[in-house]
Structure formats: C-alpha cells, structure tokens
Amino acid sequence: MVGLHGWKWSTPRFYIIAGTIIAIVAVYLLVFNPVLINGTVVAKFVTGTKDGTSYSIITITPYGGATANDPAFSDVVMNEGMGLTVNSTLEQRMMNAGYTQIRYVISIHVTSGKDTINGIGPGEALGYFTGRTEFNSLRIWDVANFQVDRLSASTVHLKD
C-alpha cells in the first residue's frame, strides 16, 4: 500500500517513526499528565533531619493542636498555636538547632480524585511534602485542590 508522497506503510521506516511517536506520547502522558486530587488538610508537620535521623519538630493536628516535639520550639507553638507559620527566621533557628533538610508535610484526606501514583483514593489520607509557602497558606480543615508531583510522588502543590 502506498501512502502520501510515495510512502510505503509497510516499510520498516514507517514502523520506526510510528513507534517513536507512540513512545513520545506515552512518556508525555506519564510524566506531564497531572494527577489531581481534592482533599481536606487534616494535619501539618515540620520535619528535619538531625544526626541522620528524621524528626517531627512541630506537629499541628485538629484535636491535639500545635505541639513542639522539640522543647526548643515550645515558645513558637505557645505564641502562634494552630495558626503557626514558618518564616525564614524560624527555619534558620531550626537549622541552628542542628536540623538539616527542613521539610513541610501536610496530611490530606482525599475527598475526590484518585492519587494513582500512591494508590490513594477518596476516604483515604496520606502525608505529602509541600513548599513552605503552601504549608503556611493552608490551615487544618482547609479544602483545596492539589496536584501530585509525578517526579516526586510524595510531593503536592496547590492547584487553582
């Protein structure tokens, strides 16, 4: 069978080109197609690594309130409570206390959508890493749309 411009559709060249196009589309869909979930923030954590071990420095939960798991940060929790925000000064204070890799975690109870990367669906919850700005903008019980990062399945970003 001869196609446009004298191409023969049964030639090896055609199969190579068709296979390449299919592979490119598959990679695009796998890497760039967003995984969107809607959920409620049910807990927040500030974590850090000290001497090779990961610690929860500050925990914020709906029933336990804000808790400093490291007594060095009790004053911050006492002053800010559930509305705690982490600015660069507080983050530097954590680093001066010996913590490295300060990370921000929000636990999301999924209400709609499915996190196919982590196998989490409606009615289930999972903790995800997020940026400091997003961590600070979210409060316990906030409902929002999130995009799960395909390249780092444990990371989410707020989605408008």
Image: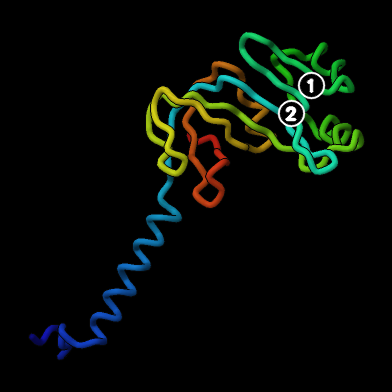
- Work out which residue is located at the far right of the displayed protein and give it: 96
SS of the residue under disc 1: loop
- The crowding category of the residue bearing disc 2, from other C-alpha atoms within 10 Å (few below 14, some 14 to 19, many at least 20), is some
Residue 79 is left or right of residue 45, and the answer is right
Residue 103, position in %: x, y? 71, 37
Q: Residue sitting at 89 percent across and 37 percent down?
A: 98
Q: Quadrant of the N terminus?
A: bottom left
Residue at 34 percent of width and 74 percent of height: 20
Say what amino acid the circle numbered 1 marks. Answer: Asn
Q: Marks 2 and 1, Cα distance to the nearest angstrom?
A: 7 Å
Residue, far left: 1
Give residue 152's position: percent from left, percent from top: 56, 48
- Residue at the spot of label 1: 69
Q: Is residue 27 left or right of residue 68?
A: left
Three-letter residue code for mark 2: Ser
Q: Residue at x 44, y 28 (%)?
A: 38
Question: Residue beneath label 2, please?
Answer: 56
Q: Secondary structure at mark 2?
A: strand
Q: Are marks 2 and 1 in contact (CB under 8 Å)?
A: yes
Q: Is residue 49 above or below residue 22?
A: above
